Amino acid sequence: FAAPKGPGPDTYKGWLFKWTNYLKGYQRRWFVLSNGLLSYYRTQAEMAHTCRGTITLATVHIEVGDTCHFVLTSGGRSYHLKAYSEGECQRWVSALQQAKANATQIMPHSDDSGDEGPLAQPDRALIQGALKTLASKLEDLNTCNELIGKHGAALQRSLSELEDLRAPTDGADKLKTVNERATLFRITSNAMINACQDFVDLAEAHSRRWQRALQYEREQRHHLEETIEQLAKQHDSLERAWRESPSTHNSEAFSLSVEHKMRCFAECPNCYFLYTECLFSILFSLCLQDGSGSYLRRGRRCRIPDKPNYSLNLWSIMKNCIGKELSKIPMPVNFNEPLSMLQRLTEDLEYSELLDRAAHCDSSLEQMCLVAAFSVSSYSTTVHRTGKPFNPLLGETYELDRVEEYGYRSICEQISHHPPAAAHHVISQRGWTLWQEITIDSKFRGKYISIMPLGNIHLKFHASGNHYVWSKVTSTVHNIIVGKLWIDQSGDIIIMNHRNKDKCHLKFSPYSYFSRDVPRKVTGVVMDGEGCAHYILSGTWDDKMESAKIIESSHGCGGSEGKQKTVYQTLPPKLMWKKYPLPENAVSMHYFSSLALTLNELEDSMAPTDSRLRPDQRLMEAGLWDEANAEKQRLEERQRLERRKREAQANLALEEVGEYLTEDSHQPLWFEKRTDTETAESSYVYKGGYWEAKDRQDWSHCPAIF
C-alpha cells in the first residue's frame, strides 16, 4: 500500500479503508485532503472524473479509536476509516486536525490535485467568463444590500421616533409590527447575499475538477471513435480478403471466440492485446462462413422463461435436517435452478479460451499463470447463483459439443449416487485435454450449507506434455434461514505440474466482518520446481485475475512467529482474465451466464440419459414448479426402488457366491477406473465410445432412467 503523500502545503493523499456495509465490510479507497475537504475515490485514476464523496472538515468531529481506526462525523453522518498502520493513522489524524484548524484560511481557488496540467485556452476562457458573470451579479446584489441596509436603518429610526410619541395603543402595535418586519427583511437579504457568496466560492473551488471531468469524457469519446473506426476498417479489409481467396484461410489457425473477445473489448477498450485478439476473432468468424456468406455454426438461445415468484417456508423443511448431507434432504425444486450438477460441472469451461492461450505458451510458468486463472474463473458464475442444482440420477449423462465454436467436446456421467460422484472428460482440438472425477460432500449446519468437492482436476497439454493437477475449494451458502442468501468460496488450491514440478499456490480468502481485504479476494504465487517464485497472482474470483512478473525479492521484517517476510518487486500487472457481463435480465433468469442459458437447450441426437431430457428439470425451466415437484418425487421414488433391487441382488450374490456387491459395482457406460502413471491416482477416466455411438445413433446400452 502506498503511504500518504505529504503533508504538503495543499494536498495530502493516500490509501485508507472505509467502512461500507455489513456485507462488503471495509473497502480500500484513495483519499485526498485539500482545501479543507476530504474526498475519496475507488482508484487514483478516478480522480480525473468520478468523486465518490466529499467531507467538509470545517464542521467535522474527529474521534480516534483503537487499532488504526478513526471516525469522522459531519452533518449527522459518520465515516469509519482505518489506516494500514498506527503510524499512518497518526499522520492522517494530524493532517485532518491541521486542515480543520486552517479550513477558513485555505485559498478558494486551490484544487484537490496540485499536479494537473493547464486547461485548454477556450475552456479556460469559458470558465473565467462564467465566474466573471457570477461576480458581476454578486456585486449588483451587494449594492442592493447596501441600499436596503441604508434605507432600512432610516425606516427603523423613523418608526422608533413615531413610537416615542406615545401614540394610541393600536397604532403602537402596528408600528411595532412594521419594525419587526423590516428587521426580518434585512436579515433575509443578508442571508441571500451569504448564499450567493457561498455559491461563487464553490464554483471557483470546483471549476477545475469539473473541467477535468469534461475533458476526460471528451478524450475517451475521441479514443473510442478512433478505435471503432480502425476496427471497422480492419473488418472490411478482412472481408474483402476472404471473398477474394477463401481457400487461403484455415480456421484451425485461430483459437479465439468472436463473441467472447468482443465482450472483453467492450469491458476494457484501452487494452491493446484484447483489441488485437478481436481482430483475429473476426477473421476466425469469417473462416466459419460457407461460400454464400452464411454462418456454418448454429445459433444458441439467449434467454429462458423468467423465474416465477413462489414463496416457501424453508425452515419448515430444513429444521429437522441439520447435520445431514445435502443430497439426502428431500428438497423441492423451489430451491433448485434448472440445471443438473453435471451441467454445472460443464459450465467450468466458460473461459476455455484461457486454456487455448495456454496451449501456445512457450514458458511453462506463463502457462501455469493461465491455468491458475482458469481454475479461478470457474467460480465467477456462482457469485449470485445460490440455487441448488439437480442431483443427477445414477447413469445420467450430459454432453456439450462446441467444436464449431470453441474446438472442444465434453461428456459427463453420474457414476455414483451415494455419495454423489461424477466423471468428466473434455478433449479440445486446440491442444489440451481435461478430465476429473468429483465427489460432492455437503452438510447443512443450520445457518449455512457447506459444499466440499472431493477429487482432482487433471489438465494435459498435447504439445508440451505438461500435466497439471488441482482440486476445488469449499463453497459456503450463508443466511439459509434468515436474511439474503449469499455465497462465499474459501480455502487453498495447489496446482502442480507433474512433468517439471512447477507449482502454484492460490489462496481464497473467506469473507470476514473484521477483514481489511476486498471481498472474494484471491492471491497466489507461481514457483518453479526448485521453489523459486516467478509470478505474483492477484484478483477476485468474481471479477478478474492479474499476474505480475517478479524481478527481485528480498527479506523484510514483520513476519509472524519471528519469521522473515519476503518482499517482492514486480513489473506492472497484466490482465489474464476478466468476467463477462451477465446477459440482460439475468436476475429473472437465475443469474445464468450466456453459456449457462444454452446448457439445457434441446438438441438432436442426444443420448436418452442426457440431463436435458430430465422431465422435472424441463418443467421447472418452463415455470411449472408444481408439476416439476410431482415429477421430481416420482423420479426419486423410482431411484429408491432401483436401489432396493440392487441391494436385493447383492444379498442374493452373498448367499450364492459369498461375495457382497455394493453400489460401487455399478459399471458406468462411458468411464472406467484406471491408475494414472504420473500421479499414481486411481480415478474414473473416459474409455471412449460415446461420440461414436452418437454418430451411429446406437443407444441400446443406455438405461431408461427417466
Image (cartoon, helix red, strand yellow):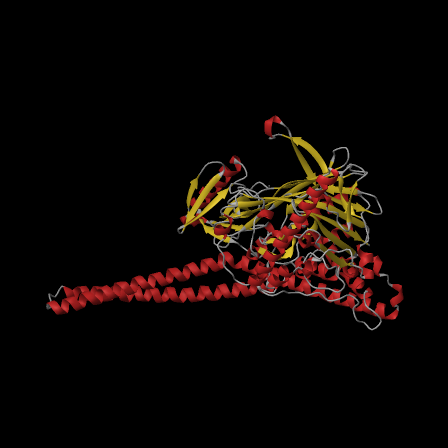
| Front-lying residue, 78 or 514 | 514
The image quarter containing residue 636 is: bottom right
| Front-lying residue, 55 or 36 | 55
Q: Residue furthest bottom?
A: 292
Residue 645: x and y in percent read 67, 49
| Front-lying residue, 30 or 686 | 686
Compared to residue 190, the image places residue 489 above or below, namely above
Q: Specify whether residue 402 is in view.
A: yes
Left or right placement of residue 65 versus residue 439 in this view: left
The image quarter containing residue 258 is: bottom right
Q: Which residue lies furthest to the top in this view?
A: 562
Residue 456: x and y in percent read 71, 42
How many numbered circles are shown? 0
Compared to residue 189, the image places residue 639 above or below, namely above
Residue 321: x and y in percent read 52, 45
The image quarter containing residue 606 is: bottom right
| Front-lying residue, 439 or 254 | 439
Left or right placement of residue 135 versus residue 530 in this view: left
Residue 184: x and y in percent read 27, 63
Q: In which quarter of the image is the C terminus?
A: bottom right
Q: Quadrant of the N terminus?
A: top right
Q: Residue at x 73, y 59 (%)?
A: 608
Q: Specify whether residue 574 is in view.
A: no
Compared to residue 74, the image places residue 156 above or below, namely below
Q: Which residue is drawn at 25% across and 66% down?
A: 181
